[in-house]
Image: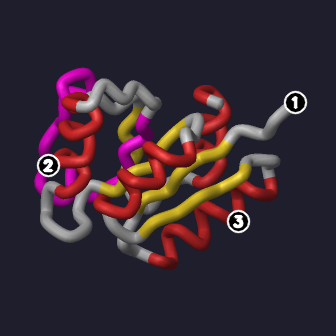
Amino acid sequence: MERKKALIIDDGIDFIAAYKAILEANGVDVLSSTNGKDGFEMLKNENPGVVVLDVMMETPDSGFEFLQKMKEEGIDTPVILCSSIAKASQMNFDINSLGAKVVMQKPVDLDKLVENVKRFI
């Protein structure tokens, strides 16, 4: 059986390293990008089973723009949104309106991340 891939898009290389280490240790192949533009190309070309996406990258709402572009292009790959933005701004996001399947607060509980990724792949 082919191993499913997870695509991590985060401008924080430390976050990518931590997510990649725990996911690979749990049998998940990992692709990564430090920006939304390259990440979107990887999404289209590599067809990962799930995307782990940061909100604030090139701009404060890069992650939301990424989700909007996915919607516009009819790409329905599940997205796990990881960010400290909700905590910092005390906002509650409507997950359905964003198009994300799960929203996780940074610092992300790595065991929960593995659990969520495995739900979708």
Residue at 19 percent of width and 45 percent of height:
64
Residue at 20 percent of width and 70 percent of height:
58
Helix, strand or loop status at disc 1: loop
Q: Which amino acid type is marked by label 2?
A: Gln
Quadrant of the image containing the N terminus? top right
Helix, strand or loop status at disc 2: loop
Q: Which amino acid type is marked by label 3?
A: Ala
Q: Which residue is mark 3?
A: 21
Residue at 50 percent of width and 47 percent of height:
45
Which callout, 2 or 1, points to the residue nearer the camera?
A: 1
**Left or right of 111: which side holds 54?**
left
Residue at 59 percent of width and 28 percent of height:
120
**Left or right of 16: which side holds 68?**
left
Which callout, 3 or 1, points to the residue nearer the camera?
A: 1
Residue projecting furthest to the front: 45
Label of residue 90 in the image: 2
Q: Which amino acid type is marked by label 1?
A: Met
Asked which quadrant contains residue 10, the reply is bottom left
Label of residue 1 in the image: 1
Q: Position of residue 113 (x, y in %)?
A: 57, 46
Q: Is residue 112 magenta?
A: no
Q: Position of residue 31 (x, y in %)?
A: 59, 58
| Foreground residue among 90 and 84 | 84
Q: Which residues are magenta?
A: 79-97
Which callout, 3 or 2, points to the residue nearer the camera?
A: 3
Q: Give the mark nearest the N terminus, 2 or 1.
A: 1
